[in-house]
Amino acid sequence: MERLQKVIAHAGIASRRKAEEYILQGRVKVNGKLVTELGVQVAKGDQVEVDGVPITQEDYVYYLLNKPRGYISSVTDDKERKVVTDLIPDETRRIYPVGRLDYDTTGLLLLTNDGELANLLTHPKHEVDKVYVAKVKGIATKPDLMPLTRGVCIEGKKTAPARFDIISIDHKTGTSIVQLTIHEGRNHQVKNMLQAVGFPVQKLKREQYGPLTLKGVQTGQFRELSHKEVNQLKEQVK
Ligand code: URA
């Protein structure tokens, strides 16, 4: 069951707010009966009409993609670069990425047509942990990275405290592999945070998103989330 205004909004007819107005204005019918109050729930098979025009209820779909480098986290690109939805070619519903990964960042990206869940997941107040693994220039030590746990200033605004782990260091190439867990999603946040403590990022991969990992999904591949996984995500943003 879904709230009526959500079903109308999801059909692309109007925003949630507008859909509420339509209901209050007496423009919406469910199974032929006028509905003028908010909060009514509708089921899959219910026939919803706005101004006498039936709407089609589209199923929600949730994909976990292992994004390769060289794809834009968008649905279209004005420079005609490849976009992440190209990797899910047979999907005809209007799916879009939940947040974004940079063009050269790889790893876990969710795509869905559930705008409400997407908005909740990307809101920093919900603090969904995202785990990144970065290859950085320089030999990182714990004291070097400690400021990340208190937050660092980026473009005049302090980041929320992050957790880090040094996975390995390579003295030969003068590089380190660092894992960073954050729950915000500012633009280029991980790159900027590591740069702020003196370690420019050479490669970046997102390995986890809340309870989800890339296990079993090769680069460029995707899978649908199970009901259980979708519910776990919903639990995180309650
Ligand atoms: N932080 C970044 O710097 N880039 C990404 O793609 C994701 C997080």
Image: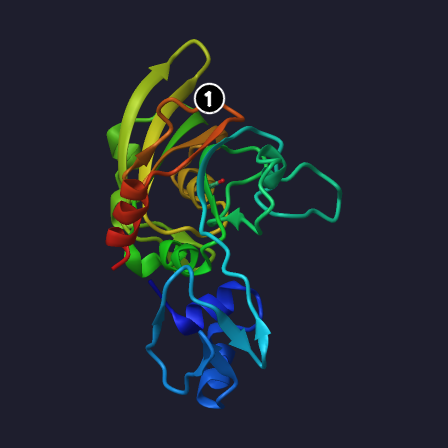
Q: Is residue 202 left or right of residue 80?
A: left
Colouring? rainbow
* 229 up-or-down from 46: above or below: above
**Residue drawn 55% across the image and 67% down it:** 55
Q: Which residue is mark 1?
A: 218
Instruction: Tell me if I can see residue 139 in this picture.
Output: no
Q: Is residue 59 left or right of residue 50?
A: left
* 39 up-or-down from 115: above or below: below
Q: Residues within 10 Å of mark 1 (few under 14, many from 20)?
A: few
In depth, the one of 229 and 101 nearer the eye is 229
Instruction: Tell me if I can see residue 5 in this picture.
Output: yes
In depth, the one of 102 and 76 nearer the eye is 76
* 182 up-or-down from 115: above or below: above
The N terminus: image quadrant = bottom left
**Residue drawn 54% across the image and 49% down it:** 96
Give, as a three-letter code, the residue at label 1.
Gln
Q: Is residue 226 left or right of residue 105?
A: left
Q: Secondary structure at mark 1?
A: loop
Q: Position of residue 153 (x, y in %)?
A: 39, 53
Q: Position of residue 8 (x, y in %)?
A: 49, 70
* 228 up-or-down from 142: above or below: below
Query: Image quarter for residue 179?
Result: top left
Q: Position of residue 43 (x, y in %)?
A: 37, 63
In the displayed image of the protein, which residue is found farthest to the front?
Answer: 32
The C terminus: image quadrant = bottom left
**Residue drawn 54% across the image and 62% down it:** 56
Q: Is residue 210 left or right of residue 170?
A: left
- Mark 1, ligand 1, within 8 Å: the answer is no
